[in-house]
Amino acid sequence: DGGITQSPKYLFRKEGQNVTLSCEQNLNHDAMYWYRQDPGQGLRLIYYSQIVNDFQKGDIAEGYSVSREKKESFPLTVTSAQKNPTAFYLCASSTDRGYENTEAFFGQGTRLTVV
Amino acid sequence: SQQGEEDPQALSIQEGENATMNCSYKTSINNLQWYRQNSGRGLVHLILIRSNEREKHSGRLRVTLDTSKKSSSLLITASRAADTASYFCATRPIQGAQKLVFGQGTRLTINP
């Protein structure tokens, strides 16, 4: 059963802690993305990766870090430098590196709350 | 920066009516896509229209694209209560095509 899996579904972070959100895909997709969604808002791009061992900053990368050591995995770390991390985080993947006309597949999201 | 801006932000109609949502974008694109999001869930792809296409259909969905006006519309015909969701347009800019850039979304409510 192919798809993209995010874990955990809910995550609570204390002030000053780093937390890592998991994103795994078995679709053999080259490109992977992380988005942040605030209540009633659209999606803002945090980081994206077109190929293993390479990734690029999106529009709101400050306070976040990523790695792409394996094609199927693209974990996102929310660091203590991110001052307002409470949000819904969505991971996506697609076959292309931006030059073909293909869709993105999304995971079910991780809701991060600072306590 | 947001590439796409949807209009209206919220739409409430009666079951059976048609729903139209609009999307405007700022820069030249390779394609434009529409996605649906049920509350608290991930996004699901609905339809993709390429920059050289003007109209596309999929079931009860009809998408138009006007590249001269940098705008697109999504029409859902004969709406059902199950169509209640948020709808987002997303663009692949020609400059920075590796990104998929989303708008703010339209929250659609279908009243039974």
Image (tube, coloured by chain):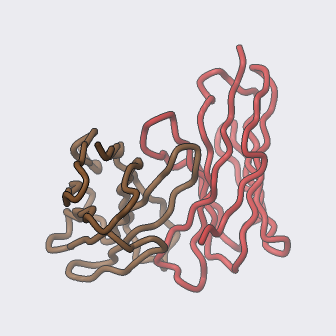
Q: With B20 as the anchor, is A66 left or right in this view?
A: left
Q: Which residue lies furthest to the bottom in this view?
A: B95
| Residue A78: % across, % down | 27, 62
- Chain for colour red: B
- Which x, y percent locates residue A67? 21, 73
Q: Where is residue B23 in the image (x, y as percent from the top left)?
A: 74, 58
Above/below status of A87 relative to B1? above
Q: Observer-nearest residue: B107 or A63?
A: A63
Work out whether residue A57 can be spotted. yes
Res. A32 image quadrant:
bottom left
Please identify which colour was used for chain A in the image: brown
Nearer-the-camera pick, B21 or B2 = B2
Question: Left or right of A114: which side holds B33?
Answer: right
Task: Classify B17 as above or below B93.
Answer: above
Q: Which residue lies furthest to the right in this view?
A: B69
Kindly identify the residue that appears in the image at 72 percent across and 74 percent down.
Answer: B26
Whether A40 is drawn above or below B55: the answer is above
Q: Residue at x 63, y 54 (%)?
A: B104
Say which residue appears at 57% left-offset and 54% top-offset: A42
Q: Residue at x 73, y 45 (%)?
A: B9
- Residue B94: image quadrant is bottom right
Q: Position of residue A38 (x, y in %)?
A: 50, 50
Query: Quarter of the image containing the N terminus of chain A?
Result: top left
Please indicate, yes or no, whether residue A25 appears anywhere in the rendered image. Answer: no
